[in-house]
Image (tube, grey):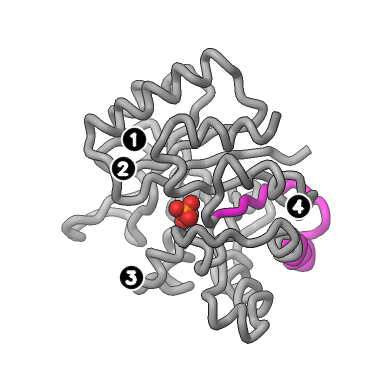
Amino acid sequence: MRKKIVAGNWKMNLNLQEGLALANELKAALAADKPNCDVVICTPFIHLAKVADVVAGTVIGLGAENCADKEKGAFTGEVSAAQVKSTGAQYVILGHSERRAYYGETAEILKEKVNLALANGLKVIFCIGEVLEEREAGKQNEVVGSQLADSLFDLTEEQLANIILAYEPVWAIGTGKTATAEQAEDMHAFIRGVIAGRFGEAAAESISILYGGSCKPSNAKEIFSKPDVDGGLIGGAALKCADFKGIIDAWK
Ligand code: 13P
């Protein structure tokens, strides 16, 4: 049985105090009402060490939103996978469309990041997804297939076991325009097929594929009810405990 996961991506929101308050609120909410899925919060680097203390010994996992494509050294302003790991985090998001679009992260760069993250014992939440023009041109499968092939196909099956995929259609991120449950299922089934083609059926059956893009308490249940949707990667709704908890509860 593959893991059901609800992961939050705080993006560049919340100062340290606000982040700690949210982590504490979520910890209390999930202690009072145990989730039926894995829960992860991915925070800015500055929050990690202190949030790690808050969530230690709870059901909440912790991740970063990025890491460097270099091991260490003179790369001012960068944060390495080893540094992320040393905070107590267990996950890192890589390949988010905002990193690809605004910071020029190519498939080659992402390959380096994925390798370093895995080598340092982090689980990778790897994001893929097409932009609106690509969907309108009917090219979404081609685009997502290439994103998978170009950054992940050199991995071993053992390494793939530490990858979680997140399908995030760029046109649905932060727009309030969610993919329909059918659109999500079509793409997730396609992705699972691509993984099966390269890594085999067993690997494809066990990899978790999350949906991301304007996921809310009101639409999570329907999206998560699809057979190939294993949870969500949540942006805006992860910034309010009640909303995030509402999405986690979609698994109940
Ligand atoms: P929203 O949930 O705000 O649309 O963001 C999704 C996302 O990008 C998560 O990584």
Question: Residue 106: horizontal and vertical position, in percent?
Answer: 43, 74
In the orientation shown, which residue stands out farthest toward the right? 201
- Alpha carbons under labels 4 and 3: distance apart: 30 Å
Residue 232, horizontal then vertical, whole percent:
59, 46
Chain-order first, disc 2 or disc 4: 2
Badge 1 amino acid: Ser
Q: Which residue is mark 3?
A: 102
Q: Quick one: 156 or 107, which is closer to the camera?
A: 107
For marks 1 and 2, give the CA distance. Answer: 5 Å
| Mark 3 residue's CB less than 8 Å from ligand 1 | no
Q: Is residue 240 among what the camera can see?
A: yes
Q: Which residue is mark 1?
A: 86
Q: Residue under circle 2?
A: 83
Real-space Cα separation, disc 2 to disc 3, in angstroms: 23 Å
Q: Pointers 1 and 2 in contact (CB under 8 A)?
A: yes
Do the numbered discs 4 and 3 sit on residues whose CB atoms are within 8 Å?
Answer: no
How crowded pointer 2 is (Cα within 10 Å; few <14, some 14-19, many 20+) is rated as: some
Q: Which mark is residue 228?
A: 4
Q: Which residue corresponds to the image point at 39% horizontal and 39% vertical from the top-left?
A: 239
Point 39% across, 50% down: residue = 65
Mark 3 residue element: helix
Instruction: Name the outermost residue toward the top.
Output: 32
Q: Which residues are magenta?
A: 189-212
Q: How busy is the neighbourhood of tag 4: few (under 14 within 10 Å), some, or many (20 plus)? A: many
| Distance between the alpha carbons at the discs numbered 3 and 1 | 27 Å
Residue 33 drawn in magenta: no
Q: Secondary structure at mark 2?
A: helix
Q: Main secondary structure of the magenta part?
A: helix
